[in-house]
Image (tube, rainbow, N blue to C red):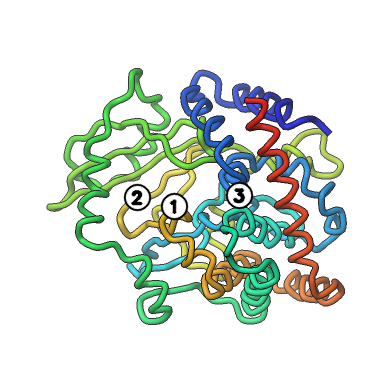
Amino acid sequence: MATISQSVRDYETWLRSQLGTDLVEADIVRKHAKMSSNGFVFLRATYWRWAETILDICPGFATAPQVLAIGDTHLENFGTWRDAEGRLVWGANDFDDAAVMPYALDLIRLSASALLARSDDGPPTRTIAASILTGYLRAMRAPAPIILERDHKWLRKALLLPDAARRAFWERFAALQPGSKPVPPAYAGALEAALPKGCGAYVPKPRAAGTGSLGRPRFVAYAEWQGGPVLREAKAMLPSAWALAHPPQGSSGMDRAIHAVDIAAGRMRCPDPHYKLSGTILVRRLSPNSIKIEIDRNPEMLLSPDMLEAMGFEIGNCHSSDPVTGSAIERDIKSRSGTWLSDTAKAAAAAVASEQRAWSQAS
């Protein structure tokens, strides 16, 4: 197996081959620095490495039932949006690395992220795994989108921003500065098409955001419309790093399909109608209603049994597009030991932490 330093070099060589001069080199430097900070951030920044190594770390899942999965699951990959009816919905909100893979990997990665993020007095490993698996199995039997308009008051209360935070949100985007070079026409066109007709003048501006997606070009359009601000984001999409590490059998190359919109609009989800793919550019609406809870700000909330169970439930929603596969998944879970998720999460988290230390020492 390649060292983490070699893996980083190989992946970034591939990234440059895909994006060419659109690659944001300053963001790559920023990502490298983030990777040195802690194991949780390292996990978020290196999904391709997870895809390369996880079946060696946890070999018992290579033949588990496969689903269209999130891929890059972690504690901070859940947030809110408005659906086509204007209702506030909560769930997984980043599908950049969605691909067909063994169902258990989404659960293992979420559990491992919780182990890496918790403090010394955080919840026990078995509590984390049991909460996630309980929610997942509940969704596999009775999946349903998590709508916050009437139910889930505890979650709605944690996510709604106060007036000062809403104002700061809009001010932050209004203050973004134009980039040093023109916005590529494909991104400018995607933003133009996504904005409501009759918007005021705007200038597309670059934005640095995320962790794993740092390096990919990302632009926003902030405009005034009908008496208030509107905001759209366009970012480059690439085939999932899972397909890069695991080309489909019988294929001479990787699966180049981008599955983000497919899973976001799955049978048991209420997607954001503004979450769309324009060629290889993902466009979405940004607003104070599209937020997530970050581990630095509220670790107790993110690591609570209720939240972990809700995350497991939402993974189940994402996996529930094929009822036949759901039955196979339940049979597979029943065939495993009662501690399979906690055991594999510990092994995965330990491997990630070891590589993070190696990266930090080398850099």
- Please state which of residues 363 and 160 is positioned toward the viewer in this rendering: 363
- Please state which of residues 79 and 295 is positioned toward the viewer in this rendering: 295
Q: Amino acid at mark 2?
A: Leu
Q: Is residue 270 above or below residue 273?
A: below
Q: Is residue 109 above or below residue 224?
A: below
Q: Which residue is disc 3 drawn over? A: 259
Q: Residue at x 67, y 26 (%)?
A: 362
Q: Which residue is disc 1 drawn over? A: 275
- Quadrant in the picture for the N terminus: top right
Image location of residue 334, percent across then percent down: 82, 77
Q: Nearer the viewer, mark 2 or mark 3?
A: 2
Distance between the alpha carbons at the discs numbered 1 and 3: 12 Å
Q: Which mark is residue 286?
A: 2
- Please state which of residues 68 and 361 is positioned toward the viewer in this rendering: 361
Q: Residue at x 54, y 65 (%)?
A: 303
Q: Secondary structure at mark 2?
A: loop
Image location of residue 338, percent across then percent down: 80, 75
- Label 2 Cα crowd, 10 Å radius (few <14 / some 14-19 / many 20+): many
Q: Amino acid at mark 3?
A: His
Q: Residue furthest front?
A: 120
Q: Nearer the viewer, mark 2 or mark 1?
A: 2
Image location of residue 271, percent across then percent down: 46, 62
